[in-house]
Amino acid sequence: MAVPKILLYYVFTPLADPDAVRLWQRNLCESLGLRGRILISKHGLNGTVGGELGALKRYVRKTRDYPAFKGIDVKWSEGTGLDENGLSLDFPRLVVKVRDEIVSFGAPDELRVDETGVVGGGERLAPEQVHELVAERGDDVVFFDGRNGFEAEIGRFRGAVIPDVATTREFTAELDSGKYDHLKDKPVVTYCTGGIRCEVLSGLMKSRGFSEVYQLEGGIVRYGEAFGDDGLWDGSLYVFDQRMSVDFSDHAAVLGRCVACGEPTKHMRNCRDLSCREQLVVCPGCAAGDPACSAHTV
C-alpha cells in the first residue's frame, strides 16, 4: 500500500556550482515522482518534498551520497494522500530554483557558511535542553518567533515575542528598529518551523548585540515530536503546503480566531485576491464566502 509522506530538510554548506545541483535535484525528483519546492544557493540546500514513502527514502539516500549533503537532517510528517499517478496531493508541482539565499532574509552578505554550517549563529538547543534552560533561568528566558506574523496566529510558544513581520525579509529592519534592544542581555531562544530560519536569524541577532542567543534545534517540528502539546508549545503548526497546518496531538489548543466571524479555528487559507500573498485564519463555514484580507475588502 502506497504511503504518502512529506520531507522537510536543509543543510548549510558551501556549493561551488548551485546550478549543477539544481539540475541534479530536479532530475532526481522527477525520476522518483516527487513534488515540492527546493531552493539552492551558494550557501546550501533547502527543501520540502512529498510523495510515496519508498520514493522519498530513495531520494534521501541519493541526496546523502553527495559528499556536501552527507549530514543533511530530514524531518518526516504525514502526507494528505497521493493521486492516481502516485504524486503528492500536498504540492501542485515540482519547483527547483537557484536563489541568492535558501531562506530569504535579504541579507546574503551577512551570512557566513563553512563545511560545518552557519558561522556565528546561536547556540543550538535540543528540545530537552530548552526545558532545562527554562527550569534554570525561569521567566528571564525569551522565546523569539522567527516566522512570519500570520504563522503565529494559530500556534506559538507560550509567552513568545512575535515580531511584526509579514515576510522573512522584514526581519533585518525589525531588528534594526531598536524595539527589541531591551532583550539584548536576556537569554533568547529563537524558533521557527524546521530550524532553518533561526540559523540565519540567530546570527543576525548576535551581530546586532544580543548577548545570549540560542536556536531551537530542529525547530517546532522536532519539539513537537518530543513533547507534543504537553510542553511549552500551544496550538497548531502552520506549514507551507496544501495541508496549511498540522497538530502534534489530539488535544492541541485552538488559538486562531476567524477573521470573518471571530470563532476559534486553526484553519487558514489564501486571500481571495490572486495578487495578494496574505494568509488568513478562517473557519470552514466562512471559508465558503471566499474571504479577503482588509486590503482587498470593499
Image: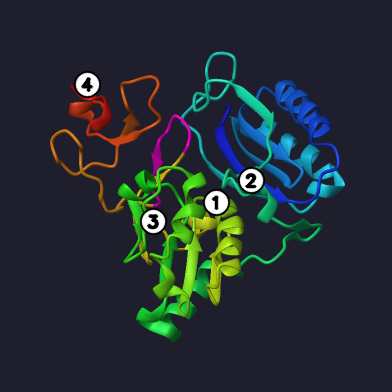
Q: Residues within 10 Å of mark 2 (few under 14, many from 20)?
A: many
Give the label on residue 288, or none. 4
Q: Which residues are magenta?
A: 240-248
Marks 3 and 4: CB-CB under 8 Å?
no
* Res 71 → quadrant: bottom right
Nearer to us: label 1 or label 3: 3
Q: Residue at x 45, y 50 (%)?
A: 147
Report the side of 5 relative to 68 (left or right): left
Callout 1 secondary element: loop
Percent of width and height locating residue 288: 22, 21
Callout 4 secondary element: loop
The residues tagged by marks 2 and 4 sit, at their Cα atoms, a distance apart of 34 Å
Quadrant of the rendering where the N terminus is positioned: top right
Percent of width and height locating residue 164: 36, 52
- Sequence-earlier tag: 1 or 3: 3
Residue under label 3, please give it: 163
Callout 3 secondary element: loop
- Sequence-earlier tag: 2 or 4: 2
The residues tagged by marks 1 and 4 sit, at their Cα atoms, a distance apart of 31 Å
* Dot 4 amino acid type: Ala
The residues tagged by marks 1 and 2 sit, at their Cα atoms, a distance apart of 8 Å
- Sequence-earlier tag: 2 or 3: 2
Residue under label 2, please give it: 9
Q: Specify the principal SS of the magenta part.
A: loop
